Amino acid sequence: MRRAHAIPVHIALILSAFIVLVPFIWVIGAGFRSQISLLMGEIWFSPTLASFNDVLFSRASDFVLNFQNSLIVGLASTALCLAIATTAAWSLGRLHWPRSVVVLFLGWSLLFHMLPPVMLAGAWYSMVRAVHLENTHAAIILAHTTLNLPMALWLMGVFVREVPQELLDAANIDGASPWMTLWKIARPIFAPGLAATGIMIFIFSWNEFAVALVLAVKQTATVPVGIAKYAQGYEIQYTQMAASAALSIIPAVILLVLGQRAIVSGLTSGALK
Amino acid sequence: MALAYADRSFRWVTLSPAALFLVVLGVLPVLNLVAMSFFTIVWKNAAADWQPVGLANYAAIPGDPLFSAGLRNTVVFAVASVAIQMVLAFFLALWCSQVRTGRTLYRTVLILPLLVPGIVVGAIWKLFLNPEFGFLGQMLGVVGLDPIDWLGEAQTALLAVIMVDVWHWTPFCFLLLLAGIEGLPRDVYEAASIDGARPWQEMLWITLPMMLPTILVTAVFRFVVAFKVFDEVYLLTGGGPGTATQVISFTIYQRFFTEDRAGFGSAISVSVIFLVCLMLVAALAVRARLQERPA
């Protein structure tokens, strides 16, 4: 590939990075302001921790609870979704189902993935009420598992295809049980794919708002539901909104630093293979 | 042939949990929507009272201002934002693939918005675009111009929401296109440079045609998500002013939950499912056409 014009290209990229970063930096800055300083539109201000203090430690704020809830929902739905999607992807990809079964299964999950989730929330709400789960995390965990299942099936379908057939044939000859073939022989090979899929669907669960909004009660509200509350009171608490937005970027930054390879592989192999 | 790893009962055991989820929490809610769409549902003494109304809910859809505005804005929003994102992402990916130093750092920064929850993106931009104290207002003030209420004016609100979506999702297209460009064969470029091709000729006649399948797949993925947009609109504008930024997910939410008209909301949902089916068929047809072409 041509590598001429290095300096203009760097300038263009730095400018783009700047456009990406300015809103983040400005909002983090707004979180360190007092409400008056922000509303007065002062360009220079003396930083205060009051809003962060309010969001994290005031008794009126549920942010820490929301954070815990997002963590519980995200981890549980990711584990559940990974377990059922991996076995199903293995089953559909490697266990010689008739083609019609595979097409029906993946076709439905593709269509399901295209539907706006908000239309399903009403039925899910009735269902969790019918089984008395409406005040529990389970309601949101089950909903997120279902919402992320098509993506997980799709990604794991790509990754289980990478296990060489010779390995399965060898395991077969050696008399390995089907579970052993999947768990001991195939899993180590698609483990990086498992990690990539896991990170992806954890992020989707962490970010999901519409369904959580319908299903959550005060005790189970996730971070997005909590942040939406700040923007909707009679008197919008701008600096608290900024502080809570700044705090909820932290997990994304951590994942980006620690799991970038898995994220990139998850996003690109789902679309490009 | 007896393949132990593909044992029949094992086949069922591995597939049924996912099948159970997709049927109980996927198919049943959709059937429930279809059933409800023929009723008016009112709550009496904490119990739902279903009154059959035939096709009346469907008959009311064409005259529903939130439905028509929602559909129109969703299409404008999805087409415009995906188109802008694809162009920006293509150049970003091209530039990023051309630099030697700092490529990982650029990529890290450029994909950051992708990982942030839609509702947080909404919160950030609601503050950032605030006419009284937002950053853009301040900058306009510095050069002596009046601030503009981007999200509050009917003429600019949809455009502002589209720009926020571009900021949020260009990273996704960028990442996929970058992976595509990095996977292109090198020898074609070597041949082109021996033949004396200029950079813009390389881009137009080599990179772009070879990237076409990746570009299409990325655009389709993005369009599917853009069509479902809800979070940003919920926080930025709530569909307003008037119906300027009303999108279809938000119409369903308002009719179904805010106004508690489950029957009518279901009829709208079923119509949207039908439209999604049409789009899916169209997308599969395009894909089949693409696969006929020799790679």
Image (cartoon, grey):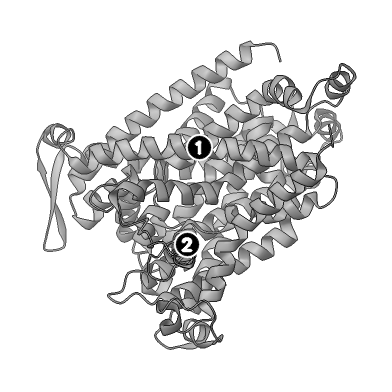
Classify mark 1: helix, strand or loop: helix
Amino acid carrying label 2: it is Leu
Q: In which quarter of the image is residue A180?
A: top right
Which chain is disc 1 placed on? B
Coordinates of residue B230 in the picture (x, y in percent): 39, 50
Classify mark 2: helix, strand or loop: helix
Check disc 2: other Cα within 10 Å, few if <14, some if 14-19, many if 20+: some
Q: Nearer the viewer, residue A165 or A121?
A: A121
Q: Which residue is drawn at 69% across and 23% down?
A: B204
Q: Nearer the viewer, residue B104 or A20?
A: A20
Contact? badges 2 and 1 (CB < 8 Å): no
Residue where numbered disc 2 is placed: B136
Coordinates of residue B244 in the picture (x, y in percent): 28, 47
Amino acid carrying label 1: it is Val
Q: Which of B128 and A92 is in front in this view?
A: B128
- Quadrant into which the C terminus of chain A falls: top right
Residue A113 seen in this snapshot = no
Q: Which residue is drawn at 58% across and 45% down?
A: B170
Q: Quadrant of residue B100?
A: top right
Specify the farthest residue to the front: B144
Coordinates of residue A117 in the picture (x, y in percent): 40, 47
- CA gap between label 2 and label 1 equals 24 Å
Residue where numbered disc 1 is placed: B82
Q: Which residue is drawn at 65% across and 11% down?
A: B293
Which chain is disc 2 placed on? B
Badge 2 or badge 1: first in the primary sequence: 1
Residue A158 seen in this snapshot = yes
Could you tell whether B58 is left or right of B246 in the image? left
Q: Quadrant of residue B196?
A: top right
